[in-house]
Amino acid sequence: MAAGALWGLVAALETHRGRDRALRALSYGCQLAGAALPGPAGLPGGLLAASAQLSSCRTALRLFDDLAMLRHSCSYGLGPEVSGAPGAPPPRGERAPCPCRSPQGEDALVRGLSVLCNVANQLFYPCEHLAWAADVGVVRAAPQKWWARSTALWGCALLLGILRSLRILFQLRRELSQHKCSTSPQRQQQLRAQVKAELLSILMDTADLSNAIHWLPPGFLWAGKFPPWLVGLLGTISSLIGIYQASRGANSEAA
């Protein structure tokens, strides 16, 4: 059992997405611990510095994500036509917005939200790349403006993902209530698992959206008002949910 878990962890860390999830969880965890510990110097300061370094590492790695996102957007297109009940989408991630992946059998609203989410995610990458390039002096531009634009696009993608999950959740609950007697126990178990996955996705995206709004320019809702420990806590919660969903997805594929 322990050996299998170890090899599963190694396999996950050998992939780009798996390594990004680990870096993300470690970055937010360091921020949470560093902000919660007393004193600005010593260990707390070191943890906050490590969190910033890990975040910068993730930003640099996202320089290569545009084509993967474009491939997903093109393969999804306008989405699959309705052919049955909606299924649960694979887990999504953060500030590297993960593509809004979609189940077979979507209605027009779910497909429309997914397409808009893909557009927002696609536009996020060049905006963040320009912000990064301006920060390091490669291009002449106002980095804060491009960071704000990329954060706004990330927030839009998260909001669209939440709305999409709510729509799928409504469809799943309706199927459970309407066909409770005629649906097989195996199908009911599958639907409940999909409901759980959507609820976790909503919780994950809501935590990330809260942070995204905090990072927007001051004056919009609670922008700039979160203490560092709260940013770390929300990010850690979101990261752990993402890792959990990814592990469940990997176990399902293996089964």
Image (tube, rainbow, N blue to C red):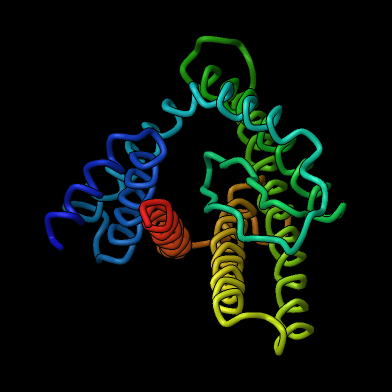
Q: Residue at x 55, y 62 (%)?
A: 207
Q: Position of residue 15 (x, y in %)?
A: 34, 35
Q: Position of residue 97 (x, y in %)?
A: 57, 41
Farthest right residue in view: 108
Q: Position of residue 125 (x, y in %)?
A: 61, 28
Where does the N terminus fall, quadrant-wise?
Answer: bottom left
In the visual, does 214 lie left or right of 246? right
Q: Residue at x 68, y 80 (%)?
A: 183
User: Looking at the rendering, which quadrant does residue 43 occupy?
Assistant: bottom left
User: Looking at the rendering, which quadrant does residue 79 occupy?
Assistant: top right
In the visual, does 72 lie left or right of 11? right
Q: Position of residue 255 (x, y in %)?
A: 37, 57
In the visual, does 227 lie left or right of 76? left
User: Looking at the rendering, which quadrant does residue 110 occupy?
Assistant: bottom right
Return the residue nearer the eye: 249 or 227.
249
Return the residue nearer the eye: 222 or 234.
234
Farthest bottom residue in view: 181
In the visual, does 81 lie left or right of 218? right
Is residue 123 in view?
Answer: no
Q: Residue at x 59, y 58 (%)?
A: 205
Q: How many marks?
A: 0
Q: Residue at x 61, y 11 (%)?
A: 140
Is residue 36 in view?
Answer: yes
